[in-house]
Image (cartoon, grey):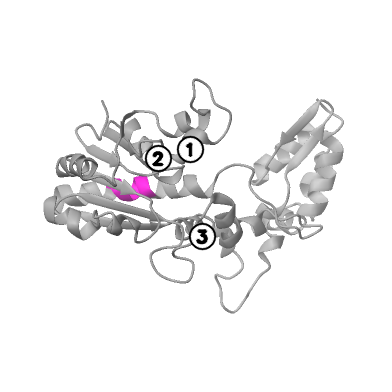
Amino acid sequence: MGPLQGIKVLDLTSMVSGPVAAMMLGDQGADVIKVEPTHGEQLRYLGEKHNDITPTFYSCNRNKKSLAIDLKSDAGKEVLWKLIDDADVLLQNFRPGAIERMGFSEEVVRKRNAGIIFVSISGFGEEGPYAHKRVYDPIIQGLSGAADIQANRETGRPGMFRIIIADKISALTAAQAISSALFHRERKGEGQHIKLSMLDATVAFFWPEGMSGLTFAEKEADHKKSFSSIDLIYESSDGYITMSTVSDKEWAGFCTAVGRPELVNDERFATARARRQNIVARREIAGAEIVKRP
């Protein structure tokens, strides 16, 4: 049971972005069929295996039925057409041009199933110098500015998120777009072609940080000095904690808890703006107090 019960999804994607998007639809009740080549998709072979399948593959493909088809054969293509005729959503993340060469372009598919939601996920979109390049999560992190946001503020060395993030951002974006397209179809009776670039989705996700110093044309600021750029991990006597005191009440509570009530009225920290401007000093003081305590 779920809000998408009765929705039939055809998942032709591989790796993470598309499979996770389809998985989320399955989590919400959709009937998802994952179509793979006869040798299985790439994610089955990445990482240590258990029962001949990697944990990541399981984690990205729950709530799905599975089918292996040779799409280079006429028989395989006929099977896929039968699935398409009955589908509400089709997801594919082949490189631009590949699905067309296979004979399943959005235009051709829509002639047989006018109301289908056709989803094309790519790394860089369908046009431009990067359009046909192979892409993986670290490439998008580098090009989107994510590595700069994670940079070491002392050395300037860019840093990567140590998890797959661009793929999952793209998956969330795709799932939301599909839900909107299904709602539009219910109201207007029209299918949609969703074209999603991983780079676009990731840039949009980091937009608040990336634009923090560029929103006002007359006053450009250094986003590297922003609150979010400071490492708010503190060492205590028995491990590490994180803490954020944004409001005056929260700051006063912290000062009282560590036995430093005089800091409440210290002009460097008396207001949220002052605390932001003096965040380095505030972090040093907070760190010196926290390290004494469990």
Task: State the separation of the CA atoms marked 1 and 2.
Answer: 10 Å
Residue 32 makes an appearance in the image: yes
User: Do the residues under discs 2 and 3 have CB atoms within 8 angstroms?
Assistant: no
Which residue sits furthest bottom?
218
Q: Is residue 120 magenta?
A: no
Task: State the separation of the CA atoms marked 2 and 3.
Answer: 21 Å
Query: In the rendered image, which quarter contains the C terminus?
Result: top right
User: Do the residues under discs 3 and 1 have CB atoms within 8 angstroms?
Assistant: no
Q: Which residue is mark 3?
A: 203
> As drawn, is 122 to the left or to the right of 86?
right
Q: Which residue is mark 2?
A: 19
User: Which amino acid, by three-letter code, is at mark 1?
Assistant: Leu
In the picture, the disc for residue 195 is: none
Q: Secondary structure at mark 2?
A: helix
The magenta segment: 174-179
Residue 271 makes an appearance in the image: no
Name which residue lies at 47% across and 33% down. Answer: 44
User: Marks 1 and 2: which is nearer the front?
Assistant: 1
